[in-house]
Image: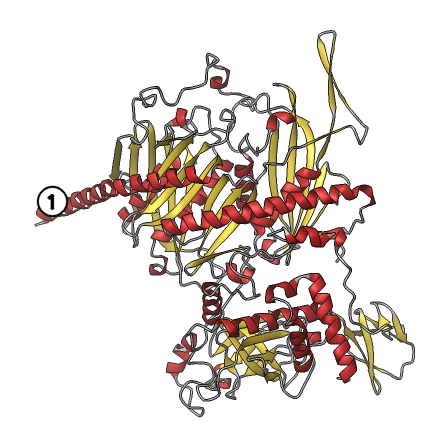
């Protein structure tokens, strides 16, 4: 994580506050900050979205390319996650500085998407064993203000919702097959992201845990649990992170909170994305202006 | 349209398109705005100040900002800048390094500031000689990460600041919250230490660092240079006051308002009808800032 | 995938023959009608475990662990001074490298770490860190290297157990040992300590409630130091699987203790012998 230094007294103030269910910005332990979201922000992509959560800003671009399916999954397409911690966000990311964080985020994303029941990869198959769509999902961190994992996963889900892959027709022609890709912008294939997960990070601070930790809170946290939660409330991936350990009972409590908050995020997100879609082309694009 | 959705949303997600553009509380026209390379004057009778350079006997600007003239001296004050310290300024800083008889302090200046061992009050007596023992105990007094309030004692030739904490009101800071805003937003006043009537204390550092903490009664007071720290839990009421102040100050900063005690109190009072956490929502922010602005105009402060 | 130019990697497009094997069209049955698994174990049975500390003679500490066909070796070096340290820190550092030997799995692994191995390295580090008294070796670091010689499932769990014994064998001060255990969830069933054929793979297990959980426990403090899951699972199942893993981890503790005591005894006897020779 990005380093923020705190004095002991500041840490104690934050810690007692969380025990009291009153955080530095007045939120209670299970409150999320408000998010701002916009999709279809980069024209050269098959799908894109931008998410802003307090000072965290994340841009996701999805590119669909044709390729060979993996031999062990001949009838399925592939998702390739890549996270780029841009030095724009903080000089600490310069060079290879952000690499560790980036692999951590992309590993957790790919793990939480790696279950056929939540994201159907067979819809990306064009010709079994020969051609499939590979979705390159590139996450770009533009600003760091804490809670990067959650924000990235929300942006990824929004970008996938926004993704429109051109239709492909397969024609058998005298023994060899021909692929024809439609150039009609409305003749497209959408992805079903209904049961795609969002990541919820629960940070254990003192004896309690919080969701959507700010950077200052992250500096007080020794152990956190990250859970990929779907709209139904199932877990698709879980991971403990940090140098501390957790009580078995508090793991359960954290999972419980994670499930609740995760479901709320998914529901709100779907609702907002559908609303944006209804606005259609009349929608006013904001882009990166603030 | 948003209202209906918001009510059934536990997590508040908005579309960027529905955002109302925040109107900033700035006067309509600012005179003398310049960008780098602009010619200020070709009159050679003026003196070249900060943010300007001479070429072809003309005075050009080197930063984007506002031209200021004091008699014959022309400077350009940039809109956004790191903190340029002046002697007598109150600053808040974080210790980043413990060195030979000195601490390095981060104060949002271009260069790290210095706090000499000889410029601090040591626990137990103001006029004690600094012994070798003290030198070994430096990390015990102030260590990496600790926050201090201090005054700028002098400015070195390279622009680095030398700080001192030789008054009981300065020193190590205890429990509370630090905010960082642009230094140009902090209004210079006679005092930067405020015990607000709402039950919190505030230090408005000239370097844009603002410290908020619950007010401690005078006798048990903070007046020990901060070496004896009270780490008892703060009451929830105090905590909420501090959190509300924090959000109000951030709201003012987001709208580019100058920060000083009465203005902050006005915003605080305007915010009272909302729960603390809601102040960070853009529409609430705009509303309370408008109320504050209005009140400031009426009361002419 | 980035290839290492310094090594001869063989033809780039080679495939393991196993993917072309016919699977008789039927799905692998994990549990038969008698509630027995393919290798005859019951659902909650774990494989026999062999653990030995002090295997690598040159390392500061080491351990070797076997669970039937899963074989893991771990070596610990250090503490030694951090070469390029950025700022003063009272705390020591641990680094972990988890590696599958190239020939350890059904398909051949690349010599350099791939994504999964990097992920495991991080998880291993986070499982061990809470157990080590980092403040006891300021400014220095300890390196933990785990190599899987043969993989037949539950490699990460084995790596956690093995590495904690190796750390203890290296006399690194620790609050507690760490034991690891995995569980496979299939439908409503929980299979502890899954072997390779039982492990969760996203390409074949399509339905909800297929997945796996791995847990690392500090048994005497009863604190969870690592927990990960894969696959879409309902909460109740994850909790149940975690509880069962917890119990197994607790049961494994004496095995770890014994192996450490044995290695200490051996060392003491060696010392005595050498004392006899010198006098």
Above or below B87: residue B83: above
So how many labels did they put on this image?
Answer: 1
Which quadrant would residue B277 be assigned to in this image? bottom right
The answer to whether A47 appears left or right of C238 in the picture is: right
Tell me which chain the residue with mark 1 is part of. C
Q: Residues within 10 Å of mark 1 (few under 14, many from 20)?
A: few
Among the 4 quarters of the image, the one containing residue B280 = bottom right
Give the quarter of the figure containing the C terminus of chain A: bottom right
Residue that appears at 30% across and 41% down? C247
Nearer to me, C141 or A204: A204
SS at mark 1 in the image: helix
Q: Is residue C210 visible?
A: yes
Q: Relative to residue B230, is residue C260 drawn left or right?
A: left
* Viewer-side residue, A281 vs C118: A281
Name the outermost residue toward the right. Answer: B42
Residue C12 in the image, given as x and y percentages of width and height: 56, 24
- Say whether residue A288 is visible: no
Residue drawn at x 26%, y 40% as measured from the top left? C251
What kind of colouring is applied to the model shown? secondary structure
The spot of residue B229 in percent (x, y) is 43, 78
Q: Is residue B180 above or below residue C175?
A: below
Above or below B119: residue C9: above
Taking the view exactly as shown, the residue that stands out farthest to the top is A174
Residue at image location 78% in from the left, 25% down from the top: A182
- x and y percent of residue C156 in the render? 39, 37
Classify residue C174 as left or right of residue A258.
Answer: left
Residue at image point 44% right, 57% down? A222
Tell me if residue B8 comes above or below residue B157 in the rendering.
above
Residue A259's spot in the image, x, y percent? 50, 46
- Would you name the residue on which mark 1 appears? C273
């Amino acid at each position: 994580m990005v380093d923020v230094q705190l004095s002991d007294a500041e840490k104690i103030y934050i810690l007692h506050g969380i025990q009291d269910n009153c955080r530095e910005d007045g939120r209670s332990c299970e409150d999320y900050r408000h998010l701002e979201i916009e999709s279809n922000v980069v024209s050269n992509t098959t799908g894109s979205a931008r998410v802003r959560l307090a000072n965290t800003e994340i841009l996701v671009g999805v590119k669909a390319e044709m390729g060979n399916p993996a031999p062990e999954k001949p009838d399925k397409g592939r998702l390739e996650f890549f996270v780029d911690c841009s030095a724009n966000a903080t000089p600490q990311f310069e060079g290879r500085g952000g690499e560790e964080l980036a692999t951590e985020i992309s590993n957790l994303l790919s793990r939480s998407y790696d279950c056929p029941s939540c994201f159907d990869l067979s819809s990306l198959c064009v010709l079994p064993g020969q051609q499939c769509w590979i979705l390159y999902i590139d996450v770009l961190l533009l600003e760091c203000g804490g809670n990067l994992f959650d924000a990235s996963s929300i942006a990824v889900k929004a970008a996938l919702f926004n993704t429109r892959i051109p239709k492909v027709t397969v024609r058998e022609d005298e023994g060899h097959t021909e692929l024809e890709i439609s150039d009609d912008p409305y003749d497209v294939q959408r992805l079903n992201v209904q049961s795609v997960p969002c990541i919820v990070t629960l940070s254990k601070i003192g004896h309690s845990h919080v969701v959507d930790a700010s950077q200052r809170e992250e500096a007080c946290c020794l152990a956190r649990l990250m859970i990929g939660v779907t709209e139904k409330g199932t877990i698709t991936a879980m991971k403990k992170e940090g140098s501390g350990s957790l009580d078995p009972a508090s793991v359960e409590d954290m999972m419980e909170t994670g499930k609740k908050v995760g479901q709320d995020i998914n529901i709100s997100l779907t609702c907002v994305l559908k609303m944006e879609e209804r606005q259609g082309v009349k929608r006013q694009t904001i882009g990166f202006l603030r | 349209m948003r209202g209906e959705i918001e009510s059934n949303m536990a997590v508040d997600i908005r579309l960027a398109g529905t955002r109302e553009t925040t109107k900033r509380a700035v006067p309509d026209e600012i005179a003398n705005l310049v960008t780098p390379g602009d010619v200020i004057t070709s009159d050679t009778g003026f003196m070249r100040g900060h943010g300007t350079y001479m070429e072809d006997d003309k005075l050009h600007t080197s930063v984007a900002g506002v031209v200021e003239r004091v008699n014959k001296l022309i400077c350009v004050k940039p809109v956004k800048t790191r903190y340029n310290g002046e002697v007598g300024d109150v600053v808040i800083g974080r210790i980043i390094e413990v060195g030979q008889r000195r601490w390095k302090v981060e104060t949002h200046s271009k260069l790290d500031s210095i706090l000499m061992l000889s410029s601090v009050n040591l626990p137990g007596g103001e006029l004690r000689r600094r012994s070798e023992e003290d030198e070994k105990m430096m990390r015990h007094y102030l260590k990496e990460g600790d926050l201090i309030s201090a005054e700028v004692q002098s400015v070195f030739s390279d622009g680095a600041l030398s700080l001192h904490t030789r008054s009981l009101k300065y020193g190590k800071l205890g429990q509370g919250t630090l905010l960082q805003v642009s230094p140009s937003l902090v209004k210079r006043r006679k005092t930067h230490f405020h015990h607000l009537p709402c039950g919190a204390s505030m230090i408005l550092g000239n370097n844009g660092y603002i410290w908020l903490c619950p007010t401690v009664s005078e006798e048990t007071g903070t007046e020990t240079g901060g070496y004896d720290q009270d780490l008892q839990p703060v009451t929830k009421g105090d905590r909420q006051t501090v959190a509300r102040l924090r959000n109000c100050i951030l709201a003012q900063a987001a709208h580019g308002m100058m920060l000083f005690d009465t203005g902050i109190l006005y915003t605080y009072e305007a915010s009272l009808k909302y729960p603390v956490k809601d102040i960070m929502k853009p529409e609430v922010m705009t509303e309370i800032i408008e109320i504050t602005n209005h009140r400031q105009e009426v009361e002419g402060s | 995938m980035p290839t290492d130019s310094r090594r001869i990697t063989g033809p780039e497009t080679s495939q393991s023959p196993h993917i072309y094997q016919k699977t008789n069209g039927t799905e692998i049955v994990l549990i038969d009608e008698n509630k027995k698994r393919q290798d005859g174990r019951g659902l909650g049975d774990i494989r026999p475990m062999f653990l030995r500390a002090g295997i690598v003679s040159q390392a500061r500490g080491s351990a070797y662990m076997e669970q039937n066909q899963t074989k893991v070796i771990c070596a610990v070096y250090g503490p030694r001074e951090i070469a390029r340290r950025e700022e003063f820190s009272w705390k020591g550092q641990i680094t972990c490298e988890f590696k599958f030997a190239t020939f350890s799995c059904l398909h051949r692994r690349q010599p350099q770490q791939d994504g999964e191995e990097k992920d495991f390295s991080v998880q291993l580090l986070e499982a061990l860190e809470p157990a080590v008294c980092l403040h006891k070796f300021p400014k220095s670091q300890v390196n933990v290297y785990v190599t899987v010689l043969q993989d037949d499932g539950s490699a990460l769990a084995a790596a956690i157990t093995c590495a904690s014994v190796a750390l203890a064998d290296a006399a690194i001060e620790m609050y507690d040992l760490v034991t690891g255990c995995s569980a496979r969830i299939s439908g409503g069933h929980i299979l502890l300590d899954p072997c390779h054929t039982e492990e969760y793979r996203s390409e074949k297990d399509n339905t909800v409630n297929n997945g796996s959980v791995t847990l690392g426990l500090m048994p005497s403090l009863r604190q969870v130091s690592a927990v990960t899951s894969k696959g879409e699972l309902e909460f109740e199942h994850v909790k149940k699987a975690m509880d069962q893993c917890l119990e197994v981890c607790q049961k494994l503790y004496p095995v770890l203790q014994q192996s450490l005591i044995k290695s200490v005894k051996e060392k003491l006897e060696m010392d005595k012998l050498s004392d006899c020779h010198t006098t």
